[in-house]
Image: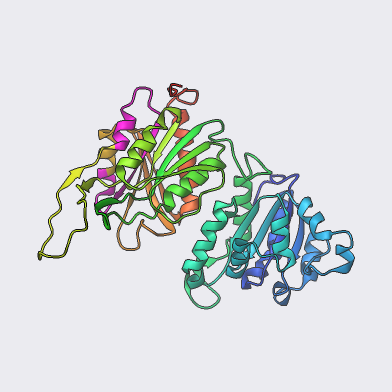
């Protein structure tokens, strides 16, 4: 049970869409009220076919709105008043269709119109078939929405009404309220916290591409999703964030300064050019360890074999950690075996403050939307089980903030760049 009063002064506009999980939403209203929130409910027309609006009116104590073309309410621009009234918009369940509408900025019904008209934070609790959740279109919509500051709670994994098993279940009402309480602990109106307030965070993310000739390159399978999620989580924690990104097709997280690069040498130069201004450096990029000497012209297919002469790329992470007055330095280690052993070797060998390690391979790590990691520091560790990368990033940032403070570096001022 959530602490009474944990959501005092919160005015929650609960949107209910036409997912089968709508039967849980009346319980969600009651739990939000128990935590101190005032709740008003807006339903989509399809939701009213699953649960009668009178049920929500009874539990919330307020009339339920479901139509944009409500003459009585709209005589006073009721949808704008609702948008201004809310300090938080929570949509539970949030269907794949609703996510698609929000991602494209559609305003075809009262709920989507309210989401465009409000300045309050928007939180979605997705609920759909596991195949729909995993579909590339849904995941692209999720990335787009997260880049605009929309937060997600879930989905959970398990048995579904259709008989499938997998991710897509709506998180239970008590857990949704618990997540809202946790997320709003620092700044109730903005779903932010002060873990990194006033600090400058530099993040590298994505792969690099090393040219073989003018038309070919060597690269790796990094999608950049984890690094972008970390950058977004750092902004949510109050930090000023710069993201140096390799070649990826991901939207820039809201509030993040982005610098695009392609090669390991470009990432090395762009990062070192900005490191003097950083309090924290998080190296989540998968930088090519070796690069070929590129041919000036396209290599023709003549021989049965092609041998590339590769040279070692500069070690960006070790270079930063070895700097006088180095920022709090966090590395990432993607391993196919002996994850903890190799990660600890990297932590100690490069003299990092912290390292985030995970196993990669088929359906593990790269290009996935979920992951699990092992976080190591010199005298401890933390295991984070499989969860959405966005949630994982917030947990990582919380650990970074805690370890930096424990290391006595909370008030360290980094070396400043001349000029």
Residue at 44% from the left image edge and 59% from the top image edge: 369
Residue drawn at (62%, 73%) of the image: 20
Whether residue 273 appears in magenta in the rendering, the answer is no
Can you say whether 274 is above or below 61 in the image?
above
Instruction: Residue 206 in the image: state x and y as whole percent.
Output: 38, 50
Is residue 155 visible in the rendered image? The answer is no
Q: Can you give x and y, in whole percent of width and height, for residue 275 in the image?
A: 41, 31
Q: How is the image coloured?
A: rainbow
Residue 274, given in percent of the width and then of the height, sits at: 42, 32
Magenta stretch: residue 318 in it? yes
Give the camera-side residue of 109 and 341.
109
Q: Residue furthest front?
A: 297
The answer to whether one can see residue 334 in this image is yes
Numbered label tally: 0
**Horizontally, is 357 left or right of 58 in the view?**
left
**Image point (30%, 27%), residue name:** 322
Instruction: Give the residue displayed 38% in from the left and 48% down from the top.
Output: 246
Q: Which residues are magenta?
A: 316-342
Please say if 187 is above or below 135.
above
The image quarter in which residue 271 lies: top left
Viewer-nearest residue: 107 or 122: 107
Residue 198 in which image quadrant: top right
Position of residue 341 in the picture relative to residue 198 (left or right): left
Q: Is residue 120 rendered to the left or right of residue 290?
A: right
């Amino acid at each position: 049970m959530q602490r009474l009063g944990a959501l005092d002064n919160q005015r929650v506009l609960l949107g209910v869409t036409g997912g089968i999980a709508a039967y849980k939403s009346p319980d969600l209203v009651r739990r939000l009220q128990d935590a101190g929130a005032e709740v008003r409910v807006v339903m989509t027309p399809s939701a009213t076919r699953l649960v009668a609006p009178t049920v929500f009116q009874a539990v919330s104590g307020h009339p339920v709105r479901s139509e944009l073309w409500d003459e009585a309410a709209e005589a006073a621009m009721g949808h704008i008043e609702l948008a201004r009234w809310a300090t938080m918009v929570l949509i539970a369940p949030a269907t794949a269709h609703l996510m698609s509408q929000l991602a494209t900025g559609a305003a075809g019904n009262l709920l989507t119109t309210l989401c465009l008209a409000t300045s309050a934070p928007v939180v979605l609790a997705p609920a759909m078939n596991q195949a729909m959740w995993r579909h590339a279109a849904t995941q692209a919509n999720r990335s787009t929405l997260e880049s605009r500051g929309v937060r997600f709670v879930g989905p959970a994994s398990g048995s579904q009404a259709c008989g499938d098993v997998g991710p897509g279940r709506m998180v239970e009402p008590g857990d949704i309220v618990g997540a809202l309480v946790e997320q709003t602990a620092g700044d109730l109106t903005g779903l932010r916290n002060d873990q990194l307030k006033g600090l400058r965070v530099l993040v590298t993310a994505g792969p690099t591409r090393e040219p073989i000739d003018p038309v070919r390159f060597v690269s790796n399978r990094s999608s950049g999703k984890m690094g972008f999620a970390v950058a977004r989580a750092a902004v949510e924690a109050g930090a000023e964030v710069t993201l140096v990104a390799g070649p990826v097709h991901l939207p820039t997280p809201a509030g993040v300064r982005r610098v695009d690069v392609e090669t390991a040498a470009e990432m090395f130069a762009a990062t070192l050019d900005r490191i003097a201004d950083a309090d924290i450096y998080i190296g989540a990029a998968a930088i090519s360890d070796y690069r070929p000497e590129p041919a000036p012209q396209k290599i023709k297919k003549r021989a049965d074999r092609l041998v590339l002469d590769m040279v070692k790329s500069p070690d960006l992470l070790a270079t930063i950690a070895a700097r006088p007055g180095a920022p709090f330095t966090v590395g990432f280690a993607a391993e196919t075996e002996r994850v903890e052993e190799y990660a600890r070797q990297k932590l100690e060998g490069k003299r990092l403050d912290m390292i985030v390690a995970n196993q990669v391979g088929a359906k593990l790590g790269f290009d996935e939307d979920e992951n699990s990691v092992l976080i190591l520091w010199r005298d401890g560790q933390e295991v984070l089980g499989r969860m959405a990368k966005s949630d994982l990033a917030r947990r990582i940032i919380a650990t970074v903030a805690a370890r930096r403070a424990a290391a006595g570096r909370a008030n360290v001022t980094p070396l400043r760049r001349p000029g």
